[in-house]
Image (tube, grey):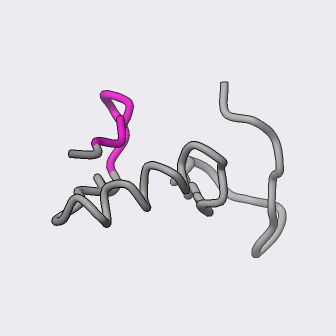
Amino acid sequence: MLYIRIDKETSGLIVFAKTEESHRSLNAQFEVRTTHKEYQAICPGESQNDHGRIELPLS
């Protein structure tokens, strides 16, 4: 079974494979990093922009 870790205070999705074939496929995708992950954050205060994109690693 494939488990994706989520940090303690993060909400989101966990991916479970229902079959051995889908497990192998998902494992391979995560291993070679062909999956697309998108993170959204809710921040206090007001933003200067209506929208935007930050492309920095999570730390």
Name the quadrant containing residue 50.
bottom right
Locate residue 6, reporting x and y percent. Answer: 36, 37
Locate residue 57, reporting x and y percent. Answer: 75, 36
Locate residue 45, reporting x and y percent. Answer: 61, 50
Q: Hey, which residue is sitting farthest bottom in the picture?
A: 50
Q: Is residue 57 left or right of residue 25?
A: right
Q: Considering the image in quadrants, where does the N terminus appear?
A: top left
Residue at screen point 18% across, 65% down: 19
Query: Which residue is nearer to you in this view: 52 or 21?
Result: 21
Asked if residue 10 is among those painted magenta in the image, a careful observer would answer yes
The secondary structure making up most of the magenta span is: loop
Name the quadrant containing residue 40.
bottom right
Query: Which residue is nearer to you in this view: 23 or 41?
Result: 23
Residue at screen point 65% across, 47% down: 32
Above or below, 19 relative to 9: below
Residue at screen point 28% across, 52% down: 14
Above or below, 51 relative to 23: below
Locate residue 58, reporting x and y percent. Answer: 67, 33
Residue at screen point 55% across, 56% down: 29
Part of the protein shown in magenta: 3-11
Q: Is residue 51 left or right of residue 36?
A: right
Above or below, 58 relative to 36: above
